[in-house]
């Protein structure tokens, strides 16, 4: 029996870990309603399940890459695996929303470390034609994890409980750690940059204060001293971050990269794609499960058209970059996302889930068209020596888009669903009686998007009245969110058409094909194409 070369062990270890990481991201959305019921979470708690992870992932991504260059990518990758695996165990053991969200934040740190070093490990282990083969296998693993994630999440949540979407990471993580420590060859970057601690702290603080303000605005009042202070503090830290990045000799994010309009366009594309459809997955999941009454497994099955279409289209989109300018592919993909969101925004109280199906297919095609082109363009619009930082910036903008999108849409959702459902109830005498008897408990349930859990306290005769009004309010609110998401995607399409100019592409940059690593192999400062798949996860 032939002995497996260590470079293939490296690929196996990285693929195993990254498959676990992406699967975890995709399964969480389907499990959110079950988590809400089990932990009695408020709607803001539910938002933080997504945002706590995205926020720390975005904040640590670029810094983690530098740590890998300095101290060895295998060592840092193994640390990321341990952090992610241990925090997954804590997530599954969580007995409160606060405990879960803190564990999710730590998970994001581990995820950032793994993303920032995974591609660099493969790039340093493989050369020539074998490198292309390795990245092809890696890309297929990422796509497969994204495609089956909702189904796996639904199956685990329905059969053994939401905790197992986290517990399943533990044995996989332990296996990946053992493979990494025993089979993966160490690599590091000589003459690496220093860590930009001021940039890291200011970016982290800015994002945290902004997200907290958006999540708490409806509850504390948008003009309250707390919320205004958070917005002001976020703006001040953004200024600190920009000034520091401009002046420091070793910036976390070199602002000179954005002198190229194409780099601005690529970053805007990443942000708007994530801030539109990927941030919307939380609210679509709530609608399918709590609004339409489907269980986690049934909901996961209904999300397959999006993930499967994205998986099928992506390889063709990658090959199209040789013949078609990137701005046309990015713009067309975002237009398809915008169109798909508008198609989904046509629900009403009597709609079945199939009302969403055309939008699912169109949106999936759009995601599949944008993702590989965006991954390639992000490292092709800058000099080779900056490709790692550029790809890391692309991944960071994705995560910022998800975090801010979930929070901003959530602020609208919490306000509108309560207003619209109460208005629908007040349209009839029976509905007004429900409002009177439901009182504050009903209002809180509506804001949390979990009104089905309050049915036991309402007379049987009034339950149908409440559910009908709730579906009316939910569908109307969802339609509004879809229009907003479509507007964000449309704006991104226009800006990508205008800014991603072919003349800005660097001739000596990486190949145009999707999934190609930076030719220097130095991806420690960024993440190359790995985090591109996060977007597909939602």
Image (spheres, helix red, strand yellow):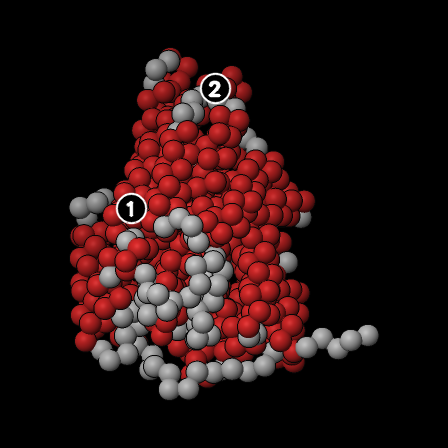
Left or right, residue 344 beside residue 158? left
- Residue at 48% of width from left, 40% of height from top? 365
Q: Residue furthest right?
A: 1
Splitting the image into 4 quarters, where does residue 260 fall? bottom left
Is residue 394 something one can see in this rendering? yes
At numbered mark 2, what does the secondary structure look like: helix, strand or loop? loop
**Residue 8 image point, x, y percent:** 65, 72
Residue wearing tag 2 = 350
- Relative to 234, is 487 above or below? above
Q: Nearer the viewer, mark 1 or mark 2?
A: 1
- Say which of 531 and 163 sits in front: 531
**Residue 528 image point, x, y percent:** 44, 65
Quadrant including the N terminus: bottom right
- Residue at 47% of width from left, 67% of height from top? 517
Please report whichever mark, 1 or 2, sits nearer to the chain's N-terminal start.
Answer: 2
**Residue 479 image point, x, y percent:** 37, 30
The number of numbered badges drawn on the structure is 2
At numbered mark 1, what does the secondary structure look like: helix, strand or loop? helix
Left or right, residue 115 beside residue 202? right
Is residue 410 something one can see in this rendering? no
- Say which of 202 and 458 sits in front: 202
Splitting the image into 4 quarters, where does residue 64 fall? bottom left
- Relative to 20, is 82 above or below? below
Label 2 crowding class (10 Å Cα cut-off): few <14, some 14-19, many 20+?
few
Residue wearing tag 1 = 497
Residues marked 1 and 2 touching at CB (< 8 Å) = no
Q: Which mark is residue 193?
A: none
């Amino acid at each position: 029996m032939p002995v497996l070369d260590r470079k293939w062990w490296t690929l196996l270890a990285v693929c195993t870990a990254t498959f676990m990481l992406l699967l975890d991201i995709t399964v969480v959305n389907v499990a959110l309603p079950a988590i809400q019921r089990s932990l009695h979470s408020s709607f803001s708690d539910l938002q933080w399940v997504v945002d706590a992870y995205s926020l720390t992932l975005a904040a640590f991504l670029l810094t983690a890459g530098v740590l890998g260059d300095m101290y060895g990518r295998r060592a840092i990758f193994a640390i990321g695996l341990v952090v992610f695996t241990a925090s997954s165990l804590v997530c599954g053991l969580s007995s409160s929303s606060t405990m879960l969200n803190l564990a999710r934040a730590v998970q994001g740190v581990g995820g950032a470390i793994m993303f920032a070093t995974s591609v660099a490990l493969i790039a340093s282990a493989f050369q020539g034609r074998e490198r292309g083969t390795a990245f092809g296998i890696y890309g297929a693993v990422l796509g497969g994890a994204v495609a089956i994630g909702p189904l796996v999440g639904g199956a685990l949540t329905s059969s053994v409980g939401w905790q197992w979407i986290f517990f399943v990471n533990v044995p996989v993580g332990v296996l990946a750690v053992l493979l990494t420590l025993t089979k993966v060859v160490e690599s590091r970057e000589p003459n690496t940059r220093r860590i930009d601690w001021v940039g890291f702290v200011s970016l982290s603080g800015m994002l945290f204060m902004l997200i907290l303000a958006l999540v708490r605005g409806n509850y504390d009042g948008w003009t309250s001293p707390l919320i205004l202070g958070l917005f002001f503090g976020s703006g001040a830290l953004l200024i600190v971050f920009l000034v520091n990045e401009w002046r420091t000799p070793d910036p976390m994010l070199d602002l000179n990269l954005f002198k190229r309009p194409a780099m601005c366009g690529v970053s805007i594309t990443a942000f708007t794609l994530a801030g539109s459809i990927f941030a919307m997955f939380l609210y679509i999941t709530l609608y399918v499960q709590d609004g339409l009454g489907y269980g986690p497994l049934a909901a996961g099955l209904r999300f397959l058209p999006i993930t499967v279409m994205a998986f099928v289209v992506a390889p063709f989109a990658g090959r199209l970059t040789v013949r078609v300018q990137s701005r046309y592919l990015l713009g067309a993909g975002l237009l398809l996302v915008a169109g798909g969101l508008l198609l989904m925004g046509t629900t009403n109280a009597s709609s079945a889930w199939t009302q969403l199906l055309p939008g699912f297919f169109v949106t999936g095609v759009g995601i599949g068209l944008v993702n590989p082109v965006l991954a390639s363009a992000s490292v092709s619009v800058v000099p080779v020596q900056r490709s790692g930082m550029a790809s890391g910036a692309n991944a960071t903008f994705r995560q910022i888009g998800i975090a801010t999108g979930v929070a901003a849409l959530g602020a609208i959702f919490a306000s509108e669903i309560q207003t619209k459902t109460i208005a629908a109830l007040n349209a009839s005498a029976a509905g007004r009686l429900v409002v009177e008897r439901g009182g504050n408990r009903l209002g809180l349930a509506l804001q949390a998007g979990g009104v089905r859990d309050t049915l036991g306290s309402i007379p049987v005769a009034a339950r149908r009245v409440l559910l009908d009004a709730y579906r009316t309010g939910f569908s109307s609110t969802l339609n509004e969110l879809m229009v907003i998401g479509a507007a964000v995607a449309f704006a991104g399409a226009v800006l990508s058409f205008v800014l991603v100019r072919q003349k800005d592409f660097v001739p000596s940059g990486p190949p145009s094909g999707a999934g190609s690593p930076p030719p220097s192999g130095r991806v420690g400062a960024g993440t190359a194409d790995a985090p591109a798949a996060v977007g597909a996860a939602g």
